[in-house]
Image: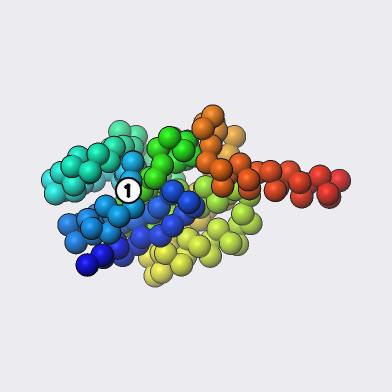
Amino acid sequence: MLTPPEQFGIIEKGVYRSDMLHPSHFSFIKALQLKTALVLSPEVPTRAVLNFLEENNIKLVHLGLSIWKPNLGWRPVSEELIKDGLEMALDVGNHPILVLCTSGIHETGTFVGCLRKLQNWNFSSIVAEYRSYAGNKVRYVNEQFIELFDMDLITLPHNLPSWFIEQQQLLQQEEGKES
């Protein structure tokens, strides 16, 4: 039986989101034929998860462990964590990729919100998507972080996914019509 993680979702083609994996999710996750698992929270995945990733040749990138900074003032996550995560998720060489954190809400939700900002979504749509996953666990500081995140920090990889390139071309066409 295929059981998706509770916070599983499709962000874009080849880019997925989730809370931390458990053995009951393995059949479902295996069907995605992932190349990369990007963990944004500092918690270490269980031995069962680590074994599953290794057995299925899924590269584990644990940014949350290497970049986690405990004293960020008002910020819920570091800009470096989101920047590095976005650059990794926008490199099609890492696809299919699963972006996850412990709850699937806070770090992952902030990450997805910043991706949507990079895609030029309007802020109310970004917040609506964030809240649809967060439910009653919404953190307004995450929404504030997304709103204030500096997109100029992102260095777009050379190997961008087609969905991102097509969205950027559509935006340029729209801007051309308005001028």
- On the question of residue 96 being in view, the answer is yes
Rendered residue at 76%/50% (across/down): 174
Q: Read off the residue under disc 1.
A: 33
Q: Residue at x 20, y 40 (%)?
A: 54
Q: Secondary structure at mark 1?
A: loop
Please state the horizontal and vertical placement of residue 40, each as a whole percent of the image. 34, 44
Residue located farthest toward the left when viewing the structure as drawn? 47
**Which residue is at the far right?**
179
Instruction: From this view, report whether residue 122 is shown above or below residue 36.
Output: below
Quadrant in the picture for the N terminus: bottom left
User: Residue 23, image x and y in percent?
Assistant: 17, 57
Q: Percent x, y for residue 90? A: 49, 39
**Is 178 or 125 nearer to us in this picture?**
178
Residue 20: give x, y in percent of width and height. Answer: 27, 54
Residue in the image at 34% along x and 52% along y: 32
Q: Residue at x 50, y 62 (%)?
A: 129
Q: Nearer the viewer, residue 41 or 71?
A: 41
Residue 133 in the figure: left or right of residue 171: left
Above-or-below relation of 82 to 147:
above
Residue 70 visible from this viewpoint: no
Is residue 10 positioned above or below 153 on the image?
Answer: below
Q: Nearer the viewer, residue 117 or 98?
A: 98
Q: Residue placed farthest to the bottom in the image?
A: 136
